[in-house]
Image (cartoon, rainbow, N blue to C red):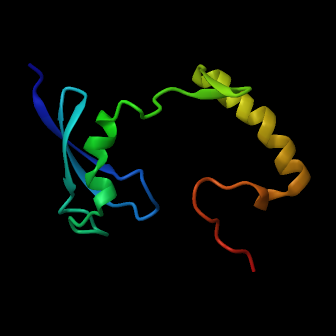
Amino acid sequence: MSRSHTAFRTCPLCEATCGLELTLEGRSLVKVRGDREDVFRHGYVCPKGLALVDLERDPDVVRRPLIRDGATHREATWDEAFSLIDERLRPIHAEHGPDSVAIGWPPARRP
């Protein structure tokens, strides 16, 4: 049986950067709570962060890169996925400028 241990991380689900206290057994996440020592959130965390245990256990979560191949998707290596992103993203950026791409939340507005 794996030993239980605690790890402290920043929640990856939004830009609020809540501090998390994670309880793991081996590499398996078994409990999530807010990190009381976190300087920004002082132990408070939203329901999304608390649901990380359920998210990790969800069999439908994509765990490897997928590349669309017509109407279906196929698994790919990380190197292949990042190479394809680079190949397709550079022309978009070159043609439409730096505001044509984002990383998940709106970028700061420029004056």
At x 42%, y 53%, the residue is 13
Image quadrant in which the N terminus is located: top left
Give residue 95's position: percent from left, percent from top: 91, 51
At x 28%, y 67%, the residue is 39
Give residue 74's position: percent from left, percent from top: 61, 21
- Tell which of 74 and 45 is nearer to you: 74
- Tell which of 61 and 84 is nearer to you: 61
Is residue 51 found left or right of 80 in the rendered image?
A: left
At x 31%, y 69%, the residue is 40
At x 12%, y 22%, the residue is 2
Is residue 68 found left or right of 89 in the rendered image?
A: left
Give residue 28's position: percent from left, percent from top: 23, 30
Q: Please count the marks in the image.
A: 0
Image quadrant in which the C terminus is located: bottom right
Q: Residue furthest right?
A: 95
Q: Residue furthest bottom?
A: 111
- 88 above or below 45? above
- 104 above or below 29? below
Is residue 31 found left or right of 64 in the rendered image?
A: left
Image-quadrant location for residue 99: bottom right
